Amino acid sequence: MTTAPLRLMLVDEDPVFRLGLRIWLEQTAGYAVVAEATQADDALAILASRASLENPPDAAPDWTPQP
């Protein structure tokens, strides 16, 4: 039985970091990047617009610590 990949949204201000993370995740079995945003407000808007879709992200991590 094949498990569907975990659908992720990447949220980070740095486009180079997001690109590197996207490439790494796409080469790692079990993950699929389905959306990206530069900040939390953008991420929430994307999530709200996709709430009625069949394949919204399963997780929307922001790995940047906030002061």
Image: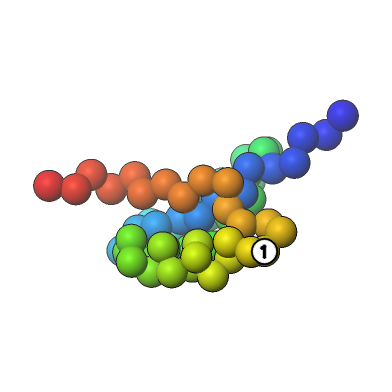
Q: Is residue 11 above or below residue 63?
A: below
| x and y, in percent, of residue 30 in the image | 67, 38
Q: Is residue 11 above or below residue 6?
A: below
| x and y, in percent, of residue 8 in the image | 55, 50
Q: Is residue 24 visible?
A: no
Name the residue nearer the viewer: 56 or 4.
56
Task: Give the residue at x 58% y 65%.
Answer: 50
**Amino acid type assigned to the residue bearing label 1 in the image:** Leu
Task: Give the residue at x 67% y 64%.
Answer: 53
Residue farthest right in this picture: 1
| x and y, in percent, of residue 59 in the image | 51, 46
Q: Is residue 43 visible?
A: yes
Quarter-of-image position of residue 54: bottom right
Mark 1 lies on a secondary structure that is loop
Residue farthest left in this picture: 67
Query: Few, some or many C-alpha atoms within 10 Å of disc 1 (few <14, some 14-19, many ≥20)?
Result: few
- Per the image, the residue denoted by label 1 is 53
| x and y, in percent, of residue 62 in the image | 36, 49
